[in-house]
Amino acid sequence: MGGLAGGEPSLLRRINSAAVLRALRDAGPSLSLSDLAREVGLSRPTVEGVLEGLARAGLVAETGSAGPAGERRPGRPARRFRFRAEAGLVLGAEVGARRVSAILADLGGARLGGAAREVPTGADADERLDQLAEVAAGLLRESGAEPGALRAVGVGSPGIVGQDGTVRLCTALPGWTGLPLAARLRARFGCEVLVENDANAAVLGERWSGAAAGSQDVVMVLAGLSPGAGSLIGGRLHRGFGGAAGEIGALHLLGRQAAPERLLAISGEPLEPLDEQAVAAVFARARAGEPPAADAVRRFVQRLVHDVTALVLALDPELVVIGGWAAGLDGVVEPLRGELARYCLRTPRVVASTLGEAAVATGALRLALDRVEEELFAVEGRVTPR
């Protein structure tokens, strides 16, 4: 505080408010006034004044005078306060080729519900956005949310996403390239919307509550027909200059290797239609012992090894997490682990995603929660009630 000049009382109040609110959020059920004052290093009168303002904003509530275990102590009862996680909601969503999904949570990150809906692969942008809006509306109804309770929405989407939430390039979804996705969804939800590449969102989800918890340098691969990867370097998401970092599905073009429909061909003809069901069928035939199918699976895994090895050699991550729909097919994670040991100068740990299909939506939820926390704990602006 020594760097603050006199005449900055409003800034000092905002700093104090942010410190008190963060301490209550991190404390769990509640904190006594005395414990809170010690935690933030402020006097009791100052903390009481801050709490009054936060209570008016709907962010703090007094919980009574019982101790942590509910017992009453002799003497003057201690006043206790808690962070009102129910003061707002955040939503994390994934828009994929075959489905849309969403997770709803309160301001403390506690999940209140989740839902998914199948979408035709040929659906246009408007239909996908309509389906997502309906899934979100259903979750909000089930939670009993009041109008305006949604504070922020995070969305994971295939493709290269610009800083303004516009999809710069996407070959996976019809009509998605050039779509101002964030702007379109802001108009629907009436709150801040953050859009991130799906693999980038997935790595954030795995680090928050999945296989990468506690790791700082991570590569998360969404294994599919055209794999993508999200990377954390020193705990920070690496998007690249234009948001195209991790688009490893294009690496085969450098070596002029076969396209995916040729890699997975069992006969001399390309695998068509090239979709998840067709690929799963090839893997099933390989497990049944059919040599042509086994050769196709081997080629598929070798392509994935080629793509992932390029990132591992460049970034030297502590951990590689394999997710995406292909990760659930027998014969992907174990061969990849073994092949990386052959080609990498230092072999990272390789594990399967623990979040599975929820990885992208979970990371998108984390994005939304981060944005709300930036606002709640900011010292540059005011904390405003909803």
Image (cartoon, helix red, strand yellow):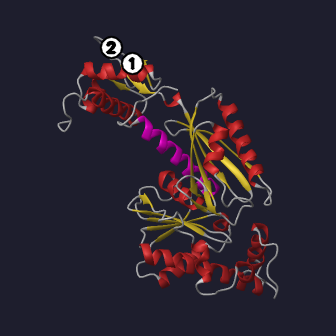
Q: Mark 1–mark 2 contact, CB under 8 Å? A: yes
Quadrant in which the N terminus is drawn: top left
Tell me: 295 left or right of 221: right
Magenta segment includes 203? no
Q: Nearer the viewer, residue 339 or 103?
A: 103
Neighbor class of circle 1 (other Cα within 10 Å; few <14, some 14-19, many 20+) is some
Q: Nearer the viewer, residue 341 or 148?
A: 148
At 47% across and 65% down in the image, what residue appears? 241
Residue 321: x, y in percent? 53, 65
At 58% across and 30% down in the image, what residue appears? 149
The residue pinned by badge 2 equals: 77
- Vertical relation: 349 (above or below) 15: below
Helix, strand or loop under label 1: loop
The residue pinned by badge 1 equals: 66
Amino acid type, mark 2: Pro
Disc number placed over residue 356 in the picture, else none: none
Helix, strand or loop under label 2: loop
What secondary structure predominates along the stretch shown in magenta? helix
